[in-house]
Amino acid sequence: MTDQQARKLGALVRAARRRKGLSLLAFMDLTGLDYSWLNRLERGLYSTPNPVHLARVAEALDIDPARIDEVSAGHLADSLPSVRTYFRSKTKATPEQLDAIEAVLREIHGEDPTADTRDRDTTGARP
């Protein structure tokens, strides 16, 4: 993310926080994030802010993550793990469970849930 994009992201977050009537301290309490990290984010000082923290900020302030991605030129989406990687590491999901999760997501997005265009090894990892 460029310096200009970081400043735009900071301005977006600051404006959303103020619209909710939150002080920076109240925002810290709401998100569980460090005051100095939030302050630096709002000042546009992070060119690669932690995507997990950004997602928490977006949720707390009701900012559409797509808007954060737009302002940051894809930083959030590019930094997050794939659905398969996330569920494999977070929940220790089996390859069969991962297939089921992906099928549901394809169905939600209007894709053929039976379509599977990827080759996988027996652990369910992507090639």
Image (cartoon, rainbow, N blue to C red):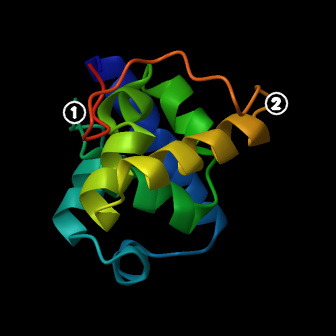
Identify residue for label 2.
110
Q: How crowded is mark 1: few (under 14 residues within 10 Å), some or many (20 or more)?
A: some
Please identify the residue farthest to the front as the structure is shown: 122
- The residue under label 1 is 48
Query: Which residue corresponds to the image point at 32% horizontal and 56% vertical from the top-left?
Result: 53
In the picture, residue 1 is in which quadrant?
A: top left
- Image: 16 above or below 28: above
Which quarter of the image is occupied by the C terminus? top left
> As rendered, which of 125 and 41 lies closer to the eye?
125
Relative placement, left or right, of 81 versus 45 is right
Identify which residue is drawn at 53% across, 68% down. 60
Count of numbered circles on the image = 2
Q: Is residue 37 left or right of residue 5?
A: left
Q: In front here: 7 or 75? A: 75
Residue 47 position within the rendered picture, expressed as x and y whole percent measured from the top left: 22, 29
Quarter assignment of residue 67: top right
Question: In this rendering, is residue 114 above or below 24?
Answer: above
- Residue 55 on image: x %, y %: 43, 53
Q: Are marks 1 and 2 in contact (CB under 8 Å)?
A: no
SS at mark 1? loop
Few, some or many C-alpha atoms within 10 Å of disc 2 (few <14, some 14-19, many ≥20)?
Answer: few
State the SS at label 2. Answer: loop
Q: Residue at x 38, y 23 (%)?
A: 5
Residue 21: quarter of image: bottom right
Tell me the kind of residue under disc 1.
Thr
Instruction: Tell me how far mark 1 sits from mark 2, CA to CA.
Output: 32 Å
The x and y percentages for residue 8 are: 45, 30
